[in-house]
Amino acid sequence: MISNRIFKYAFMMFVLLIMNISSVKANSFYTNQKDSPSVIGRWDITVNMDGKQYPSWLEVHRSGIKTLVGEFVGISGSARPISRINFNDGKITFSLPPQWEAYDNDLSFEAHFDADSLVGTMITGDGKNYTWTAVRAPLLHRLTEPVCKSQLHYLMEKI
């Protein structure tokens, strides 16, 4: 006969498994829709500035049904939220207000697809124009959600 404690533990693990599967299915629903723009995802960017290459990063995702938003990490500063990314006819555009830059004008970005990469330009707040390219960042899929040992011990104590 199974003890009450073992039954509770097994039930709790079953619920956590179902929650994890539901989360994966919900995420794949939004990212695999037929109308989902191919720009959604994480991008590793290389910015060409005065003969040197600098790394940057872009993530694009949905907010609601059709609005695209994201985050951008440039060659300086920290992750910046992008309130709207426009995507029309294979071309994306967005702008960001200055963060640590000394000028008042926004950073402006424009790009188009070249095969499975993005090729674009960035205009800084002081009017300088730089080119950049982006490739998809590698996917990092987990088989299960990480569990902190202290959380697991806490849950076990509650059983």
Image (cartoon, helix red, strand yellow):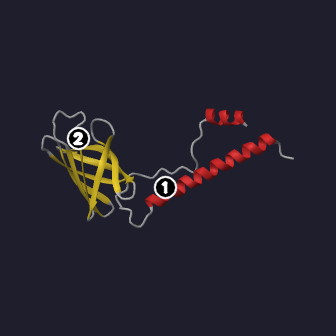
Q: Is residue 86 depicted above or below 100 in this figure?
A: below
Q: How crowded is mark 1: few (under 14 residues within 10 Å), some or many (20 or more)?
A: few
| Circle 2 Cα neighbour tier, 10 Å, few/some/many (<14 / 14–19 / ≥20) | some
Residue 95 x/y as whole percent? 23, 47
Q: Which structural element holds mark 1?
A: helix
The answer to whether residue 13 is left or right of residue 129 is right
Indicate the amino acid at tag 1: Asn
Q: What is the CA distance from the residue labelled 2 to the residue labelled 1?
A: 30 Å
Q: Earlier in the sequence, mark 2 or mark 1?
A: 1
Residue depicted at 62% across the width and 53% down the height: 18
**Image-quadrant location for residue 50:** top left
- What residue is drawn where x is 72% and y is 47%? 11
Q: Tell me, yes or no, if residue 58 can be seen here.
A: no
Return the residue nearer the eye: 156 or 53: 156
The circle drawn on residue 58 is none
The percent coordinates of residue 39 (x first, y second) are 34, 58
Which amino acid, by three-letter code, is at mark 2? Pro
Rendered image: mark on residue 97: 2
- Looking at the rendering, which quadrant does residue 81 occupy? top left
